[in-house]
């Protein structure tokens, strides 16, 4: 095969894979996590045979779909915090936006919460970004961090439990609850009560459609 | 039936149920969560028919076994902290002992971590006791707590993520990791860095067999 032909083939394969991942993401968001593979391939407009060139099973596709959605969400948070020089503020803004996500896309949120063990330890998505922000804040003398792994354990655990709490307590305002957790975490990182409150109360950028398949870019 | 006969029957039913729960706990601890019901009833020395008088399924029995194990563990922690007048110290000691539990009984720990959503929201076990200790410490002016639900969300999330971290990082010392998380949580609750370190470094009571089927009492 010529190089041009080989490149064309690679591009077509990449398009097929993207179409399957995007279809899986919209099925997940619609709560249809048990949809048959045939229906997913039809929605993606690819043949059944193509499916198995890329994925071993529906679970395999859905795992990739969740990982890539979370990574795109993380990239969106990066964009939404790039105007901030203070890594403490960047960490806080990302945490506060993430807490508001659970009710925007409850199905994806529940899928994420069910695979929290994988996501917390993943090198994609939100966990590595939170770690990066905390490390930068420690480096800049803004956070007191003795053990980054343990700080991440607390932050990740709080984020996961907060999502679960918000699903179980529809009567609680998600913004208030999230901002209080953020404020407590800032105090843990050594900020004064006053500064923690101020940073956790700053205006957030207006974000529309921070959901699967529609993340702003 | 006479009253005495009825009481005897009740006692026998309670003994059968206890025997099944204890057998399930030892199967869980041995990692045999897929053991057939027949084998569990044989280990409990009760008939197959008796099983269904008490439980709908193996999952039902295992759920009860986990709940009761956790509640007994909580009762043990109550005993191990009853010498402490300071609720901040009681909270810390319980947290530090709980963090040391994951490697003492890894199978049960993993079962617990897999059903964290239920356990974190349960009115039995460790969650209500942690909430009680935090509320008492706030009441006594030892902890600054603005929102008890959110404080519990952070503490429970940290406890769950810590357990997962310890399983994934066998190279990390569980006592050091746990005590650092405890120390960070104390700082979040408004203690000075110095006092947080002191309390998280206090000697712990010697506990043998804080494991399923062998909790000290």
Image (cartoon, coloured by chain):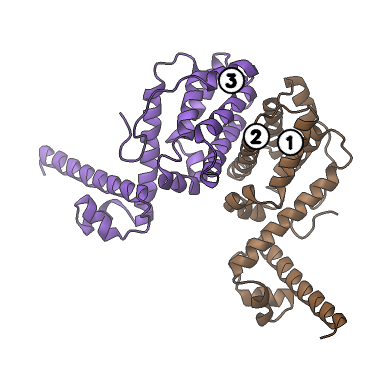
Chain colours: A brown, B purple
B81 horizontally vs A35: left or right = left
Vertical comparison of B123 with A108: above or below? above
Q: Which residue is mark 2?
A: A151
The tag earlier along the polypeptide, 1 or 2, is 1
Compared to A198, does A167 lie above or below?
below
> How far across and down, in percent of the image, does residue A77 sit?
80, 46
Q: Measuring 55% from the left and 33% from the top, which residue is drawn there?
A: B177
Tag 2 secondary structure:
helix
Q: Say which element carries label 1.
A: helix
Q: Quadrant of the N terminus of chain A?
A: bottom right
Mark 3, residue position: B197
Q: Are marks 1 and 2 in contact (CB under 8 Å)?
A: yes
Judge whether A194 appears above or below A65 on screen.
above
Q: Position of residue B178 (x, y in %)?
A: 53, 32
Give the image quarter of residue A44: bottom right
Q: Are marks 3 and 1 in contact (CB under 8 Å)?
A: no
Q: Chain of mark 2?
A: A
- Front-most of residues B17 and A142: A142
**Is residue A22 found left or right of B20 in the rendered image?**
right
- Out of B7 and A130, give the one closest to the viewer: A130
Asked if badges 1 and 2 are on one and the same chain, I answer yes
Q: Name the foreground residue: B4 vs B24.
A: B24
Could you tell me how far apart the alpha carbons at marks 1 and 2 are, in whole angstroms? 8 Å
Q: Pointer 1: what residue? A: A134
């Amino acid at each position: 095969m010529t190089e041009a032909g080989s490149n064309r083939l690679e591009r077509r394969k990449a398009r097929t894979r993207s179409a399957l991942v995007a279809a899986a993401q919209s099925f997940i968001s619609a709560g249809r996590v048990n949809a048959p593979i045939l229906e997913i391939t039809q929605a993606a407009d690819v043949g059944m045979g193509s499916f198995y060139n890329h994925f071993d099973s529906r679970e395999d596709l859905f795992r990739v779909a969740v990982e890539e959605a979370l990574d795109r969400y993380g990239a969106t948070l990066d964009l939404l915090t790039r105007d901030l020089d203070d890594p403490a503020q960047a960490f806080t803004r990302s945490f506060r936006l993430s807490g508001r996500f659970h009710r925007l896309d409850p199905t994806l949120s529940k899928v994420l919460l069910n695979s929290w063990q994988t996501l917390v330890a993943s090198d994609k998505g939100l966990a590595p970004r939170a770690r990066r922000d905390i490390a930068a804040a420690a480096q800049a003398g803004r956070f007191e961090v003795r053990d980054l792994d343990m700080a991440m354990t607390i932050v990740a655990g709080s984020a996961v439990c907060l999502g679960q709490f918000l699903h179980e307590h529809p009567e609680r305002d998600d913004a208030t609850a999230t901002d209080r957790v953020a404020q407590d975490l800032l105090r843990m990182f050594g900020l004064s009560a006053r500064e923690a409150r101020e940073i956790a109360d700053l205006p957030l950028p207006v974000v529309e459609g921070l959901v699967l398949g529609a993340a702003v870019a």
